[in-house]
Image (cartoon, grey):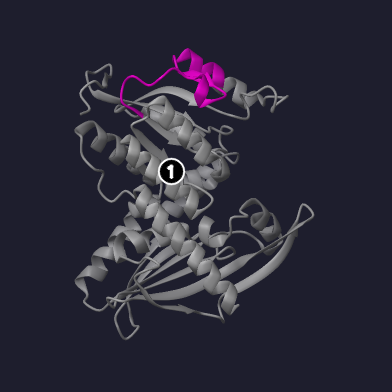
Amino acid sequence: NFIQVSMGSGGTKQLDVVIVGCGLPKRGMGWYHLTQLLEMGNANLSAVVEPFFLNPDLCKNVPESFEALVKSLKDKGVTTAKSVEDLEEFNAPTMCLIAGRTMDNPKFFRQCVAKGAKIIYLEKPGAPSVKELEEMASLAEEKGVKVYIGYNKNVTPYVQKALAVANKNAGSQVLFCHNNSYTTEALPECFGRNSEGMLKNMAVHELALLVSFFNVTVETIDKFEIDGEFSEKLTLDFNSKSYIDFSRIRFTVTTKSGATVSVMADRCGGNVSYALVQDKEGNDIEKFEFPDAETAAKVEEQVQADPEMMPYFFVQSDDYLELKNRVINATLAGKEPEGVATINVGVEALKLAEYGTAQLNESL
């Protein structure tokens, strides 16, 4: 049912895309999506909504970098607005890419659906709570809107390679390790700025992998075993408020059908994450690192050349592009994108996050 799509200059099919929540150049996730979309032949960036920097009541001094961005978008014929409600109704099939603050996403989502969006790409985790994401999922179903969540690890090569090795070795298990490179001194700010907690913020990518590839849901869990020696819970103060969260966690899930998979996350673990495949005796079969040595060297060069850019944009650039291409190409072909997390996977991942947080809090 996607006949009336825009045609690009070379006669290629294009999908109209609206970005909701842009943020600052070199800092905001929406901005990074925007730079990629402008280069993608299958996408026609029709509008950019930025609720803070484009709202004079909220932002009194617009940063120069943002003013320059608005000018360059206008030169390209891209509409800019402070609210989705200020846009015209979407007549052609349109994908809204929502990259605002997690707490604002449910409101933006309803506005996009009301304008006639047929595809919505939500940045993870999609909403602050299971209840809100479930309400969004039922609205989407009622209105016939397809919703995908930007869990880039679902398509990243190191995960795909580990899954392929695990599938070839009967009885094997996988450990997904996710590291950040915060210093101990930076943890209070990290806890404050990511107050939804480690499992809904950092480790939710791994939880989406468990749902997508191992059929782990709260209902299918038989055992949830926590490594109490490794895991650490802290109470830290930031901006005169106290935050209780985990600096590092490790747990193993066994499902009722006998699948075993482990997750480890460490806020101060460094820049390299990995997937480790082990046999049923616990011997290592193969380890896949991300970024690998070659990519890490390339990223280091890019960071040195452009220190203002958020480093993770360089690290995950290919994955962000791959996800958008899968969603847009599948939409244009009237198909489902392979391996991309749907909103239902997102709901199950958030349920796991709430369940895991409760289990960890009880045991630590």
Q: How many marks?
A: 1
Whether 145 is among the magenta residues is no
Local crowd at mark 1 within 10 Å, few (<14), some, or many (≥20)?
many
User: At which x and y percent is residue 265?
Assistant: 51, 66
User: At which x and y percent is residue 302?
Assistant: 50, 43
User: At which x and y percent is residue 168?
Assistant: 20, 71
Which quadrant holds the N terminus? top left
Three-letter amino acid code at disc 1?
A: Met
Q: Residue at x 32, y 86 (%)?
A: 281
Residue 5 in sight from this viewpoint: yes
Q: Residue at x 59, y 55 (%)?
A: 196
In this image, 73 relative to 214: left or right?
right
Q: In this rendering, is residue 167 above or below 14?
A: below
In this image, 219 relative to 5: left or right?
right
Tag 1 residue: 136
Q: In this rendering, is residue 61 above or below 105?
A: above
Element carrying mark 1 = helix
Q: Hey, which quadrant is residue 161 in on the image?
A: bottom left
User: At which x and y percent is residue 25?
Assistant: 56, 32
Q: Nearer the viewer, residue 342 or 300?
A: 342
Whether 92 is among the magenta residues is yes
Farthest residue toward the front?
A: 142
Residue 315 in sight from this viewpoint: no
Which quadrant holds the C terminus? bottom right
Q: Nearer the viewer, residue 11 or 225?
A: 225
Farthest residue toward the bottom?
A: 281
Q: In this rendering, is residue 154 above or below 325?
A: below
Q: Residue at x 61, y 26 (%)?
A: 65
Magenta range is: 70-94
Q: Hey, which quadrant is residue 252 in on the image?
A: bottom left
